[in-house]
Image: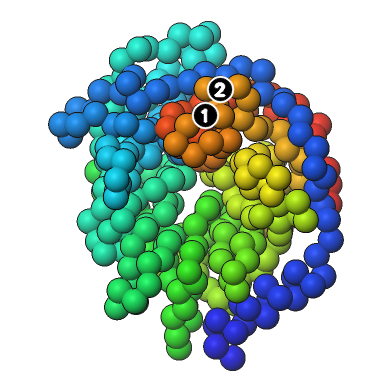
Amino acid sequence: MEIKNVLYEKNKNFLEKKRSIRKNITKNIFFKRYYIYPDNLRIKNYQRRPIAIFNPGAVLEDKKLKIFPRLIFDYYNYTSSVGFFELNIENILNNIVKNEIDASVILYPEYLWEFLGSEDARVIKYNGEYLMLYTGKGYVDHNEKRRDVLAFSKLDHNLEILNKSFFKISNDKEIFYPPTMKDSAFLDIKGDIASILTRLEIDNTFLCWKGTADLKKMRVLPDSLEPIMAAESWETKVGWSTNAIKVGNNYLVGWHAVLKEDLSYKNGFAIVDEEGNLLGISDYLLYPEGMIENYGDRAFVIFGDGLIKYGDYIIWVGGISDYAIGIFVTTLKDVMENIRII
């Protein structure tokens, strides 16, 4: 059977058998919230000022919070890139954020598959290198249709790009490109094989999937893909929001959903094992509040992309309404108390 048909069948069967695992309940567990605006950044290697900085990935090294924001320099027909800057984590927790922050563009569109933008990075540090998953917005199959591809870049310790490509869903016989494949995170990595979480568009629906990726052949193995979470009846879609962080033998990861009633983005947490099996889930624990978080280029949004653990703190570094960055602080205890075992 063709890959497309296999995935359509898995998608269909999951939707037919799915049960509700979340409630339409919103609870704010983040007790500190800090903001970084476009005017705060000084781009050192590109002679323009960003008009939007949002949906950042994040990595913590010692006490340096390394942030990888999506950058936009134009409003009309804009093309996104990925930037970089770093802050001292203790300064953030003590409410000390500089008004001027040096930043740089580290990744920008170079290929047709990212012709329309390089967006929404999730970043981890592995074996001394930075592994970045991001959305490449462009064309792949003879330019017939615009697609969102799951792009992957490996960067060295100086943030120089070592390689850059995108994943196909393929075996030794065929290749399948879904309309969108994005919102993804690495879990367990052994050599060139990684377990991942991803979000596929299949038959006009958006489900959260788990799977296995070959980092050398740049393919996701179709037989490994299984849907594990769907939108609830009051939601239009769901997706994975952040990188995954190790908690005990399992992984903590953020997810998002878009609500039908007001098209707002709300976020929660999930626990998965090293293969991506869903073990626990929360209701909504992070959502936009007040004018600063709600009013932007796309209203009512907190989205992605960075999740870190610092001592007892869990820190979510995300975009606010497609124009600025929010840094949201809670504790691991508060997170775990709000996760139900499935």
Marks 1/2: CA–CA distance: 5 Å
- Residue 25 percent coordinates (x, y): 80, 37
In the rendered image, the quadrant that contains the N terminus is bottom right
Asked if residue 62 shows in the view, the reply is yes
In the image, is residue 4 above or below residue 294? below
Q: Name the residue: 79% across, 72% down.
A: 16
Q: Observer-nearest residue: 231 or 182?
A: 231
Is 56 positioned to the left or the right of 202 in the image?
Answer: left
Q: Amino acid at mark 1?
A: Tyr
- Residue 196's image quarter? bottom right
Q: Name the residue: 61% across, 41% down.
A: 265
Is 40 positioned to the left or the right of 19 in the image?
Answer: left
- Residue 283 percent coordinates (x, y): 77, 40
In the image, is residue 310 above or below residue 217? above
Which residue is disc 1 drawn over?
295
In the image, is residue 146 above or below residue 336? below
Report the coloring of the rendering: rainbow
Q: Secondary structure at mark 2?
A: helix
Q: Secondary structure at mark 1?
A: loop
- Residue 250 percent coordinates (x, y): 69, 46
Q: Observer-nearest residue: 58 or 265?
A: 265
Which residue is disc 2 drawn over?
291
Characterize the local packing of mark 2: few (<14), some (14-19) or many (20 or more) Cα atoms within 10 angstroms: few
- Residue 269 percent coordinates (x, y): 69, 41
Is 328 positioned to the left or the right of 19 in the image?
Answer: left
Q: Observer-nearest residue: 239 or 157?
A: 239
- Residue 198's image quarter? bottom right
Q: Amino acid at mark 2?
A: Met
Is 228 positioned to the left or the right of 87 in the image?
Answer: right
